[in-house]
Amino acid sequence: MTHAIGSRRWAIADGYIPSSSASDDPALVSHESACVLNTGDTPAKVEITLFFSDREPAGPFRFTVAARRTVHLRFNDLDDPEPVPRDTPYASLIEADTPVVVQQTRLDSRQPSHALLSTIAYCQD
Amino acid sequence: MTHAIGSRRWAIADGYIPSSSASDDPALVSHESACVLNTGDTPAKVEITLFFSDREPAGPFRFTVAARRTVHLRFNDLDDPEPVPRDTPYASLIEADTPVVVQQTRLDSRQPSHALLSTIAYCQD
Amino acid sequence: MTHAIGSRRWAIADGYIPSSSASDDPALVSHESACVLNTGDTPAKVEITLFFSDREPAGPFRFTVAARRTVHLRFNDLDDPEPVPRDTPYASLIEADTPVVVQQTRLDSRQPSHALLSTIAYCQD
Amino acid sequence: MTHAIGSRRWAIADGYIPSSSASDDPALVSHESACVLNTGDTPAKVEITLFFSDREPAGPFRFTVAARRTVHLRFNDLDDPEPVPRDTPYASLIEADTPVVVQQTRLDSRQPSHALLSTIAYCQD
């Protein structure tokens, strides 16, 4: 391994967690993830700030991605300092103290055959 | 918060709003969104220009994203200076007076189990 | 309009057109598109080269995107110098003589409720 | 052809192969692909390293993309030095000795009408 790949600042403009799901299977419940990859040899301390259309930002939500690990963080699971509202447009800023790579994925199971979307997040150091 | 993340010029090459929807639920009507995030401390004045295959561009469509807010703008809702035609290929140029982040998402509910697509838009200052 | 947004060289690594479709509606037949936006004031002459896993590249496929227009080109419709094989992995290089923006979208209707994927293409001048 | 388009280092943060599929058709089995395009005139030697949430990385997985060819590599098919676990979050680093373009695509057929996601991977030389 040479130097870590990635950036320290990422943003995801389209956040949205549907409140309903056609399945009770935890893997198939409607959810949205920020997948964070740390290829480096030191842990990445990550802070997420959430933005909304009609209120001040929430956060920071803090977690760590250990060296040479990936964390597929479900926004559904965030609860400190507060949970993420459902059926509500939001966006997120992801800041790390060492380079990481961030990809967003949503599984929308409001209908029986679920839909997926994914995109590399936007980065800018 | 340090400086705002993003770019002042964005483009989305694949625009298309299906005219039909399997559901009357507003959340599940076929639609396309430009999700714009403004992490900065000043409002972002945004102008969208729409491009077509066989006519001159339409617009500008103007809106503001307040400081530290996100707007998930539905192209379906645009009507000033004109509405966006359905079942018609288009593309869009999004220009702001301060850095923003833009992501495109389409929900296509022509069939009972809807499909999703999303991508970070293209940016270039 | 100031200068045109975009790049002159783009690539799409995942090309694939399923040969079957659950619908005969032309809008819902399985297809893949390269959506090209030309925001500039001069026409963009575009050439696509297709790459495969086991043969030399095909093309160039040539078309023009007029000034201030978008073309949502279906790979399904290419036939000069040759058609695009179905059920066959391919990739594409899109080269223009003036800056354009390229996004790829696939509609896969092998099953009754179709699936969509889309991504901004990769660019490098 | 002028110089090859692309980058030598790519990352995909969201890897996940569902273990179940509604179809036995090999084309419709749940799978995830790294689509690699080599537009250059020399072969690209590629190494993939896989990252997980709770163990050290796996790999390198080695393959070659011949000059002017594309390989749509299914992560499902990797088995040297080890297979990719199903239903397990992972991420990948793709390194080549010459510029290539990488796009990720997942087909999720856990439900009868499958879902698709795709994104250009993240690159950084």
Image: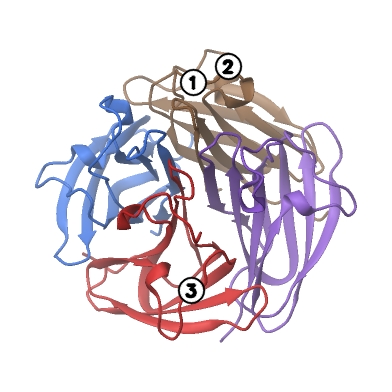
Chain colours: A purple, B brown, C blue, D red
Q: Mark 2 — residue?
A: B24
- The lab-note entry on whether marks 1 and 3 share a chain reads no
Q: Residue at x 26, y 79 (%)?
A: D43
Look at the picture and state if B21 lies above or below C64: above
Instruction: Provide the chain ID for the residue under circle 2.
Output: B
Res C112 quadrant in image:
top left
Estimate the spatial distance between the alpha carbons at disc 1 and disc 2, rounded to whole Å: 7 Å
Q: Residues within 10 Å of mark 1 (few under 14, many from 20)?
A: some
Q: Mark 3 — residue?
A: D84
Q: Residue at x 72, y 82 (%)?
A: A42
- The lab-note entry on whether marks 1 and 2 share a chain reads yes
Instruction: Provide the chain ID for the residue under circle 1.
Output: B
| Element at label 3 | loop
Image marks 1 and 2: residues in contact by CB distance under 8 Å: yes
| Element at label 2 | loop
Say which amino acid is labelled 1. Answer: Ser
Q: Is residue D21 visible?
A: yes
Q: Is residue B3 visible?
A: no
Q: Position of residue C122 (x, y in %)?
A: 41, 56
Res D34 quadrant in image:
bottom left
Res D80 quadrant in image:
bottom left
Q: Mark 1 — residue?
A: B21
Q: Residue at x 52, y 72 (%)?
A: D85
Look at the picture and state if C74 lies above or below A45: above
Estimate the spatial distance between the alpha carbons at disc 2 and disc 3, rounded to whole Å: 42 Å
Image marks 1 and 3: residues in contact by CB distance under 8 Å: no
